[in-house]
Amino acid sequence: MRKEPPRGEELAVAAPHCYCGRLAWLQTSWTESNSLRRFFVCPKSEVGGKTIVVFFVWIDIEMPPHERALVAWLLRTMREVEDQIRCARAREKKLWIALFISWAFVFIVWFDNVM
Ligand SMILES: [Zn+2]
C-alpha cells in the first residue's frame, strides 16, 4: 500500500487587512503563555523601535493548560539543548586549535633535532 506524502500546514484563513490598509502578517507566538499560537498582526506594528499594536487577531484557539505547559517545557528544553550544543562547538573549536598548536610544536622540535 502506498503511503501518502506528508502535507504542509494549510492555512484556511485569509489574511485580513489592518485598519491602516496593510495586509496583516501571519506570525507565531513564542511566549510561554501562548507557545506556537498563530496570530495576525499589522506589519507596521513597530514604529521607531516602539511596538504599537493597532491590529492583532489570534487564529488558533488557546491551548488547554496542560498542553501549554508541555509545549513551554519542550521549548525551554530545546533552548537548553541549543545552548549546550553552542558551548560544545566552542569547546571543540578551542580543542582543535590546541591540537594544531601542539602538533606544530612537535613538528618544530622534531625538525630541529633532525637538522
Ligand atoms: Zn496597520
Image: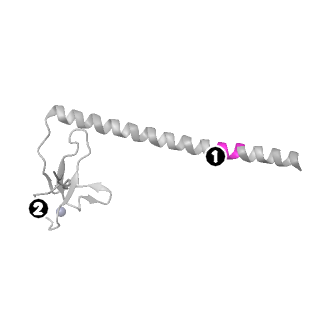
Q: What's the residue at 17%, 31% (across, down)?
A: 66
Q: Residues within 10 Å of mark 1 (few under 14, many from 20)?
A: few
Q: What's the residue at 32%, 36% (across, down)?
A: 76
Amino acid identity at mark 1: Ile
In this rendering, position of residue 46 left or right of residue 21: right
Instruction: Respond yes or no on whether mark 2 lies under 8 Å from ligand 1.
Output: no
Which residue occupies the foreground of this view, 68 or 107?
107
Q: Which mark is residue 14?
A: 2
| Mark whose residue sits in front, 1 or 2 | 1
SS under mark 1: helix
SS under mark 2: loop
Residue furthest front in the image: 1
Instruction: Look at the picture and state if 58 lies above or below 22.
Output: above
Residue furthest right in the image: 115
In this rendering, position of residue 90 left or right of residue 58: right
Give the magenta part as a residue range. 98-102
Q: CA distance from mark 1 to mark 2?
A: 53 Å
**Which residue, given by chain and number where applicable, does mark 1 sit on?**
97
